[in-house]
Image (cartoon, rainbow, N blue to C red):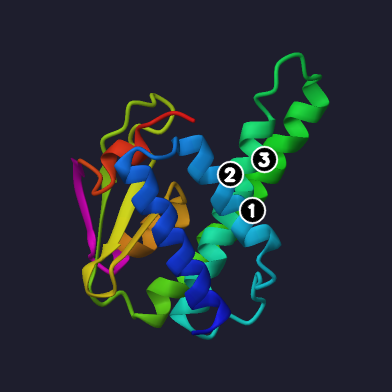
Amino acid sequence: MNAIQKYFKYRQNLIDQYIKGDMTKREYLQRNYEAVIYGDIGPFSNIDTIEKALFNYQYYNALAKEQKLLSTTKDMNYELKRDFLEQSNYYYNKKDRATLAVLRMLDYQGAKAYFISVHSKYLKGKLFEIVIEEENIILHSTSSFILKCLREEMVFCEESRKSLIDEYVNRRY
């Protein structure tokens, strides 16, 4: 088993613990963050496999969420808060590059995408889910460019649906 496979096995274990209620969403995010940061794997600059692209997706998603969380610290000055949010957006952009890499490697085959129902007013009509059932992949994005690509490839359904991981997506952390 290579390092990436070990990470995904560990991540699945974290997901199982979260689903059972053995950890909170914040605890799950913290442990996943620690696994990608201290795991000595990546990120990969040459994304030539789906496995590497999915690792980069997880890596940058973890960093983005961590920076976003840091931006919510009380009594933080505006400039520092803005810096954390800019870093978060930078990492979300890198995550979206990994998403595009996955879609392109699969030539969009087996992909379906749709907006998801969310509690957040900010994300309503922006956050969409990409599902590739055969590969057991669920990805999320708000990227207008990815949305455009999905529509061009005719794999985007315009109706809003409940996320396959709705309880997780709509839980605050």
Look at mark 2 in the image and give the residue it sits on. Answer: 30
Q: For the residues carrying marks 1 and 3, which lies nearer the camera in this image?
A: 1
The main secondary structure of the magenta stretch is strand
Give the alpha-carbon distance from disc 1 to disc 3, as whole Å: 13 Å
Q: Secondary structure at mark 3?
A: helix
Amino acid type, mark 2: Gln
Give the alpha-carbon distance from disc 1 to disc 2, as whole Å: 6 Å
Instruction: State left or right for residue 141 relative to residue 134.
Output: right
Amino acid type, mark 3: Gln
Where 70 falls versus 77 (above or below)? below
Q: Which mark is residue 34?
A: 1
Marks 3 and 2, the one that precedes in the sequence: 2
User: Around disc 2, counting alpha carbons within 10 Å, would you say few (fewer than 14), some (14 to 19), or many (20 or more)?
Assistant: some
User: Around disc 1, counting alpha carbons within 10 Å, would you say few (fewer than 14), some (14 to 19), or many (20 or more)?
Assistant: some
Amino acid type, mark 1: Glu
Q: What residue do we see at 53% from left, 83% from top?
A: 2
Look at mark 3 in the image and give the residue it sits on. Answer: 67
Q: Secondary structure at mark 1?
A: helix
Q: For the residues carrying marks 3 and 2, which lies nearer the camera in this image?
A: 2
Q: Secondary structure at mark 2?
A: helix
CB of mark 1 within 8 Å of CB of mark 2?
yes
The location of residue 11, given as percent across then percent down, is 46, 60
Work out whether residue 99 can be spotted.
no
Q: Quadrant of residue 60?
A: bottom right
Instruction: State left or right for residue 124 relative to residue 36.
Output: left
Q: Quadrant of residue 37?
A: bottom right
| Boundaries of the magenta span | 152-161
Q: What residue do we see at 64% from left, 53% from top?
A: 34
Q: What residue do we see at 29% from left, 74% from top?
A: 135
